[in-house]
Image (cartoon, grey):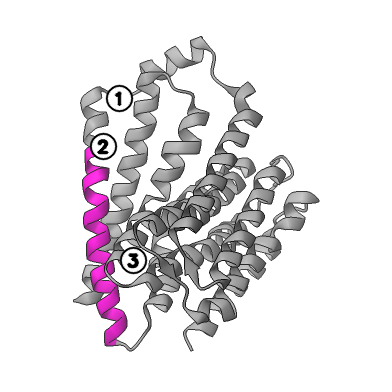
Amino acid sequence: MLWTLSFLGLCLLLLSGDFLVKGAIQLSNRLGISALIVSLTVVAFGTSAPELIVAIKATLSGSPGLALGNVVGSNIANILLVLGLPTLIFGLQNDIADTKRSFGVMIAASALFILFGITGGYSFTYGIVLLSLLAFFLLDTFKQNSKNAFNDENLEFQKRISHSWWTIIFFLTLGIVGLPLGADILVTNASALAKSYGISDAIVGLTLVAIGTSLPELATTFIAVVRKKAEVVLGNLIGSNIFNLLAIIGITSLFSPVPVDPTFLRLDFWIMLGASLLIAPFIFFNIRLNRLSGFIFVTLYISYLTAILK
């Protein structure tokens, strides 16, 4: 029963996050806001909403290991599984994607995240610092891409193809209501499931919840790889990891301090950083992400799961 309820909670989270993103995109179209701005703000937060809600709920309910495990596990899964699996099947010509700048921000965010974690936990002050870095990233990205903003003709076209106001309100309402409900079901039953098997909250967060909340990224990546949109693939994964590190823990720590279990310091933080650095050659030297690369990534992820589940 606990497995079934956990799965239902996860499904509700994913569906609600999808509705929230759809509603936000359509809202931007109706209001004539640049898609760039929406992608960097509403959509980025929308796709990270499951992680955010789970993290806040888990921390406030006394399971901070689940919250931190979800963030760290999602970042590991995003690189090794979400990028690795589609690449293993299709391969990816990534030399047209210029993500060097955002990749540098992701590495800097990862290093700062680990540095704060080494001190024992994420306090209110650390949360402010993380969110400040996020604000800097968004502002810098906006400046770098402002030349791609829509002209008046494109904005009018976006307004014509958008849904009605009632449809937009319906999507947004489903997302806003469904996210906390799904989080409550998932966190409550996942924690009970962990205790029934003698598994720590941190392990559940690093595996079951992390993989589950990475499913939207996995679906997006599969579609983008098939369509040979390398900039979408890498941009989506790098942006998601940045938001997980800076926004999820940053916002969560404003509600309550997030302590760091010593197990994260021994292995998981360094796996997360190593996985991020693993894609550096592909980004800076335009090395093609072929099926062999995908095989290595997926194999590393399976090895990681095997190590933490022993």
Number of numbered callouts drawn: 3
Q: Mark 3 points at which residue?
A: 59
Which of the 4 image quarters holds residue 169?
Answer: top left
Camera-nearest residue between 231 and 125: 125
Q: What element carries label 3?
A: helix
Residue 218 in sight: no
Q: Which amino acid does label 2 sit on?
A: Phe
Q: What residue type is labelled 1?
A: His
Q: Earlier in the sequence, mark 2 or mark 1?
A: 1
Q: Quote the CA–CA distance across marks 2 and 1.
A: 10 Å
Which of the 4 image quarters holds residue 297?
Answer: bottom right
Q: Name the residue under label 1.
A: 163
Camera-nearest residue between 136 and 223: 136
Q: Quote the CA–CA distance across marks 1 and 3.
A: 37 Å
Residue 153 in sight: yes
Q: Which residue is drawn at 52% across and 76% down?
A: 264
- For residue 201, side relative to residue 151 (left or right): left
* Span shown in magenta: 171-196
The quadrant in which the N terminus is found is: bottom left
Up/down of 176 relative to 288, above or below: above
Q: Name the residue under label 2.
A: 171
Q: Main secondary structure of the magenta part?
A: helix
Measuring from the top left, give residue 117's x and y in whole percent: 54, 69
Camera-nearest residue between 19 and 127: 127
- For residue 26, side relative to residue 133 (left or right): left
Q: Residue at x 24, y 72 (%)?
A: 189
Up/down of 187 relative to 31, above or below: below
Outermost residue toward the front?
Answer: 125
Q: What residue type is labelled 3?
A: Thr
